[in-house]
Amino acid sequence: MTVTEPPEIATEPPEIRSARRRYVTVCALFWLPPGLAMAPLVLLFTERGMALTAIAGFYAVHSLTVAALELPTGGLSDAIGRRPVLALAGVLNTGALVIHALGSTAWALTLGMVLMGAGRALASGPAEAWYVDSVQACSGPGADLRTGLARGSAATSAALAAGILLGGALPWLLGTGPDLGARITEATGGVVLPLSVPVLLGAAVQIAFVCYVLAALREPPRPPVTARSVLRGIPGTVLSGVRLGGRDALVRRVLLTTAAAGSALAAIELLMPGRAVTLTGASASGAMLFAGLACGGFVCAGLGSHLAPLLARRTGSGERAVLAGLGVSTLGLLLLGVTAAFTRPASIAMVGLGFALVYAGFGAAGPNENALLHRRVTGEGRATALSVQSLAQQSVGALTGVIVGAMSPGPWPWLLVTGVLLAGTLLWLGRGGGGLPGMPEPVEAGERVP
């Protein structure tokens, strides 16, 4: 049986299909290194002698760095172009991963978090802004964005899933057989641990990301700018970003929801590695369990992202699709909280189900949220808008990390962030479709007009 593409995709200009492929590739290459580092990083810091409170502090430094730089770097991308900003982000992330893999002191690890936060801030909007600019340059402001955004989000989830599975498996594999990990540690004088290997591999992938961005992301020339003019424009960029959420109710809901999601993800990233070690009894096997759980979660996120356009059609609008996706995520987070007090083997299955629900819901909600956001902003401020969104996620995530890191282990940290996510979900109750003022949201094949 031959499967044909939907008419709105099959008749697309080749330029749009090319832009989508490049955007998907950039998403995959950028997010594979964080995936490789996600499973071993907290445990690597622990092996270096860092307490959980110190690790929470490292992650808070990362989030606060992102928060401080989000709006200025978003404006930088709008001023000098998407490609150079993305390349610089890859360079900073490469340095951060090398420091995290080899560093053994608190100041070095803090420096790594600052570099990683700066890289994250630089990369939070340019790739998506480049894709939207490219599509709208070919088909106008009413072009379908949701399909490409969904595929980019699915590629991000797939890269994170593959990276975290490999990142969790490598230290375990190095410890089997002839115990190659011990030999590497001995040969390097303790500088390279088995948990360091996936992080170093991530640094190598970041170098490939920089090369691809410089070679593949073409964009029209921009008027020349000077460092002084860019710096002079930063206060205005920050002010416009702050005003963005104040003057538009839909954008404000997107930002508040992103903040709530950032709270949930920060708790998962900080608490789950230790929870996995508790369930297995050893750091290497705990990293492997966490990698498996997170990999399954990101696979579900990719599936949710792939189905985001379908969810919007079935529910009748992008806003109702956001509500449905966030409701599923809230249910999954509640399940993680309920099972946090148990250590029986059956708990692993429940944790896996919770992960699946959390990430599938976020995957389905994200492209629909961003499609709504892009129809509220113009190309001149697109990267700034995405930076405001990332700022909301990172700042609330940093605060959440500090709070849950100081709380006693058990269900209460999980239930706290479940309440935050539920509050963000309820913002979308009773909301209909939306687009630019005076312009309805594009109706895809089969979608019902509210």
Image (spheres, helix red, strand yellow):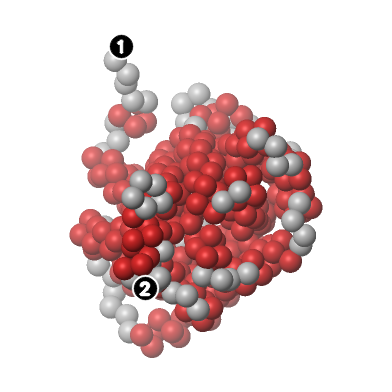
Tell which residue pokes out farthest to the left in this image: 215
- Which residue does the image show at 40% across and 81% down from the upper left? 230
3D distance between C-alphas at marks 2 and 1: 60 Å
Give the number of the disc on residue 189.
2
Compare residues 7 and 338 and report the one nearer the observer: 338
Left or right of 238 in this view: 399: right
Disc 1 designates what residue?
1
Q: Earlier in the sequence, mark 2 or mark 1?
A: 1
Hey, what amino acid is under mark 2? Gly
Hey, what amino acid is under mark 1? Met
Residue 361 percent across, percent down from the top left: 60, 39
Residue 410 percent across, percent down from the top left: 76, 51
Above or below: residue 57 compared with residue 225 = above
Select label 2 or label 1 by which is in front: 2
Is residue 320 visible in the rendered structure shown here? no
- Which residue does the image show at 50% across and 78% down from the upper left? 105
- Which residue does the image show at 30% across and 36% down from the upper left? 12
Residue 117 percent across, percent down from the top left: 49, 70
Crowdedness near tag 2: few (<14), some (14–19) or many (≥20) residues, C-alpha within 10 Å: few
Mark 1 and mark 2 in contact (Cβ < 8 Å)? no
Q: Which element type, helix, strand or loop, lies under badge 1?
A: loop
On the image, which quarter does residue 339 sit in?
top right
